[in-house]
Image: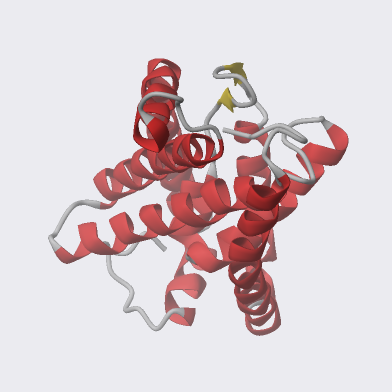
Amino acid sequence: MHIMEGFLPPLHAAGWAAASAPFVIVGAVRLRRIVREKPEARLLLGASGAFAFLLSALKLPSVTGSCSHPTGTGLGAALFGPSVMTLMATIVLLFQALLLAHGGLTTLGANVFSMGIVGPWVAWAMVRGGGAVGLSVPVRVFLAAFLGDLATYVTTALQLGLAFPDPATGFTGASVKFLSIFAVTQMPLAVVEGLLTVAVVNWLSRNSADDLRLLAEMRGEEKDSGHVA
């Protein structure tokens, strides 16, 4: 998913950075509020960030200029909401660009938009929507991580299709090509990420029930089995 350094045309890189910046700012405000009001949540925040860092660093070669890997953002989105996950994903992507040469600084905005904004918002919508129709917590968590992962790659394919349209079929043809190549490796990775995220949430439910309850109370939710946190 990480688009490598210097791969996007300068105007595309600048445009994605401008589009991502407001979401990152909102995430910073939201995170500051959580840390101020619920300092006990810092451990879970750190764990969510580490989960995203480790999973998104497990890259497999994919299309030119990008790669396939789990994203790890579904867990943080389910626990803290998509805004906080945007900031955490930005930090993860920045560290990976500087320390692992994974992604890049000029493509940071595009990578944040796909992995830090679209993926977490899709995951969060699945958590909330699944609760509204009565899905169990494990099913909601699995679908959130699975669909958030796939949404990230759909966004990356569209970004690449927009930057490098096919000479014959244009943006649509190029996007379909990128999507078809991503799908080979990403579908099984998304399933694995969904199952792993369910296992982590189950573990947290058994061992950090008080912290999960604090997060639910902070969001104004009632404590019952239908809430992820």
Residue 57 place in picture, x, y as percent? 67, 30
**Quick check: 174 above or below 212?**
above
**Quick check: 27 above or below 94?**
below
> Of 188 and 64, which appears nearest the observer?
64
What residue appears at the point 78 percent right and 47 percent down from the top-left corner?
A: 94
The part of the image, by quadrant, that contains residue 25 is: bottom right
The part of the image, by quadrant, that contains residue 166 is: top left
The part of the image, by quadrant, that contains residue 167 is: top left
**Quick check: 43 above or below 95?**
below
Q: Is residue 29 left or right of residue 116?
A: right
> Of 136 and 116, which appears nearest the observer?
116
Residue 43 place in picture, x, y as percent? 68, 59
Residue 165 place in picture, x, y as percent? 48, 32
If the image is split into quadrants, where does the N terminus sit? top right
Q: Is residue 88 visible?
A: no
If the image is split into quadrants, where does the C terminus sit? bottom left
Question: Which residue is at the far right?
Answer: 99
Question: Which residue is at the far left?
Answer: 133
Question: Which residue is at the far front?
Answer: 168
Q: Is residue 128 visible?
A: yes
What residue appears at the point 36 percent right and 20 percent down from the top-left corner?
A: 180
What residue appears at the point 80 percent right and 44 percent down from the top-left corner?
A: 95
Residue 190 place in picture, x, y as percent? 40, 30
What residue appears at the point 53 percent right and 35 percent down from the top-left corner?
A: 160
**Quick check: 199 above or below 131?**
above
